[in-house]
Image (tube, grey):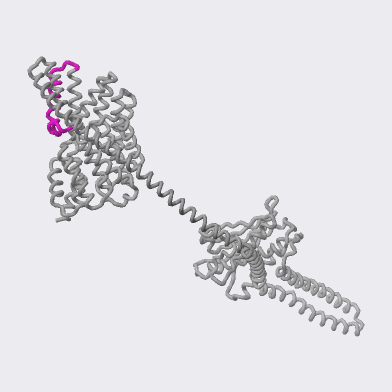
Amino acid sequence: MKASLKIILFTLLPFLPHAQQNLPDSLRKVFFNANNDSVRYEAAIHLYDYYEELNRDSAFFYGEQSVLISRRNNKKLNEAYSLSRKAYQEVNKGRFAEALHSLLDAFAISENVENEKYYWAAHPLRQESQKRLYALSCTHHIFAILMRETRNMEQQLIHFREARRIAVEINSPGRSVLGSLNLGRIYLETGKLDSALFYENQAEEIARKSGREKYLSGILLYKGMIYLNKGDTMNALSHFYEGIRSGAEQNNLDGLVRGYRDLGRYYVTKQNKDSSLYYAMKQLEISKRLGGVSAFGYHIGVSYESLYLVYQLRNQFDSAYKYLALAQRTNDSINQSKIESLAEFQKLTLNEQQRLQNVEKEKVVYQNKIRTWFLLAGIGVLLLLAIIFYRNNRQKHKAKIKIEQAYDNLKATQQQLIQSEKMASLGELTAGIAHEIQNPLNFVNNFSDVNEELLTEMKDELSKGKIEDAIALANDAIENEKKINHHGKRADAIVKNMLQHSRSSSRIKEPTDINQLADEYLRLAYHGLRAKDKSFNADIKTDFDDSIGKINIIPQDIGRVVLNLINNAFYAVDEKKKQNLNGYEPTVSVSTKREKDKVEIKVKDNGNGIPQKVLDKIFQPFFTTKPTGQGTGLGLSLSYDIVKAHGGELKVKTKEGEGSEFVIQLN
C-alpha cells in the first residue's frame, strides 16, 4: 500500500500545473492513506500549494499538518519551511499573534547552521542546494508580509530586501520572483514609479524564464497600476487583462480577485456602467470563493464597496445603499477582528520585548559571575605560573648547558653524516676507478715487456755491428717509454682525483676543464655500477661544448655533484628497465653548454621521472624516494648546497613516466 501511494504521488507531481481537476482528490487520498510520514508530508506540501491562493482554510489545514509531521520526525528544515507557510495563512486570516509565534520558531530553526542535516528532500527542498537558506528566505518574506499588515512599513522593506538577497545568493528563481514583486509593490505605493517598474519587470522576466508563473498575475496587475499612474492607459489595460488571464490559468484566486477589482474601478472612473458592473460582480464571486470575510487584503468588504460605487454610477441608489451597508457591516467586523488581533499582536510583542530584557539582565548577571570566576581562576593560574617560573629559573643554567651539548652533538652528527655521504659516493667510485686504473697499467706492463724485447734485440744488433738497426730499435724503445710515461701519468691523475674526492674540500677554486671532469665522472660512475651489477647496461650520450674552456671551481666539490646526479640517473633508468616495458632503452646523457655568462651542466635520463607531489621535497635533507637502506637522502641536499656555495643554481625538470633532467648553472 505504501509503495503504491508513493508511485501515485510522484507520478502526479511532474504534472501538477496540468492536473487541476483530479489533483486535490488524488493528493488527499495519498495524504490520508499513506503510512509513511515522508510521503504524507510531501502530499501535504503540494495540497498547500494548490489551496494557497484558492482556499485559505484548506491551505491553513495542510500547512499546519506539514508542521506537525516534520516536527514529529525531527526534520528541522522542513518544519521551518512549513511554519512560514502556516504563518502566511495566519496573516491572511488576521491571526497576527499566532503568525508571529510561528515565524519566531521558524527563525530560530533556520538561523541555526546545526539544523542543516535534519530534513527530508521534499518539495521544494529537494531541488534547493542551500536548503537552510531557502527556509530562511521564506521566513523573512512572510515576516515582511506580517509587518505590512501590522503597519510597520520600515520592517516590511528590510525583510523583503533580506528575503530577496538570500534568494539571489542561493539562485532560487521562485523566491527571487516574490522578492522583486513585493519590492515593486512597495515602491508603487510610495509613488516611486520608475523603481516600481524596474522590480516588477525583473520579477516578470525571472517568472517567465524559470516557469514560476503562479504569481505572474500579481506582477502584471502591479505593472498595470504603474502604467495607469504614468498615464499610459493602453499599457495599463493590456496588463490588467493579461493578469486576469494568468490568474485563471494558475488558479490564483488572490490575483484574479485583484484583477477584477482593478478593472472594475478603472471602468467606474470612465463612467462605463456595464463593464464596471460585470467586473465588480466577478470580484464578489471570487472573493467568496477565496475565503469570505476572514480573508484579509482582497476580501468581501472590498467587493461590496466596488458594487456600491458601480450602482451609484448607474443611479440605482437602492442597490447602492444596500451594498454600502453590507460593506460597512463587513468592514466593521473585519476591523474589529483586526483591532483584536493587533492588540494581541502588540501584547505578544511587548511580552517578547520584556522577555528579551529579562534574558539580557540574566545574561549580565551570569557574565558577572563568569568574570568573578575567571578572575579567581586567573589569580590561581598566576600563582601556579610564579611557582613554575621559580622552578624553571633554578633549572635554567642546567638546561642551557644541556642545549649547548646537544647543539655540539648535532653539529658533530651533521659532519659525520656529510662525511658518510662522501664515503658512500667514494665507495661507488672505487670499482670504476679500479677499472680506469687497470687500462693504463695494462699499457705500462705491455710496453715494458716490449721494451725489454727491443733492448735485447738492440744488444744483439750492436754485437753484430749493425749500428743502424740498433738505432732504429732504440728509437722504438724511446717511443714506448713516452707511452709508458703517458699512461703512468693517467693512472696518477685518477688516483689524485680519488684522493681529492675523499678528503675534505680545500675551499680553493682552481681553473678546471669542466668537459674533462664530466666525462671522467661519467665513465667512473658507469664502470662502478657495472662492477656491482654485471646485468646493468645503459646507452650513454655526451655533448660537450668545446668553447667553454676552463672555469674556476672547486673540482672535487663539483665532481661530487656531477657524480651524484649521474648515479641517480643510472638508478632511475635501471629501475624503469626492471618493469620490462616493450621497446624501452635506458639512456643517460651528459652535456655542457655556455649560455651567455653562465655554464650549464645537464644530466638527463629517460627513467620514471619524479612524482609532482614530492618534487618540492627532493632537495630537503634526508628525503629520498629510494627504498629503505638504499639511500641516505643527503645526496641531492649536499649537491644543492655545493652549487649554491659556488653562486650557481641546481634545477630540475621532470615529467612523470618520461624522465628527469638536472641542470647545474655556474657563473
In the depicted structure, whether residue 446 falls above or below residue 389:
below
State yes or no: residue 285 in magenta: yes
Magenta highlight: main SS: helix
In the depicted structure, whether residue 628 falls above or below residue 349:
below
At x 13%, y 16%, the residue is 313
Side of 474 relative to 126 (left or right): right
Q: How far across and down, in percent of the image, does residue 347 sit?
A: 24, 35
Side of 568 relative to 580 (left or right): right
Residue 339 visible here: yes
| The quarter of the displayed image where residue 316 is located | top left
Q: Quadrant of the N terminus?
A: bottom left
Q: Nearer the viewer, residue 308 or 195?
A: 308
Extreme residue toward the right, this view: 465
Extreme residue toward the left, this view: 318
Q: Which residues lie in the magenta part?
A: 269-295
Side of 350 relative to 571 (left or right): left
| The quarter of the displayed image where residue 663 is located | bottom right
Q: How far across and down, in percent of the image, does residue 258 sit?
A: 20, 28
In the depicted structure, whether residue 277 falls above or below residue 545:
above
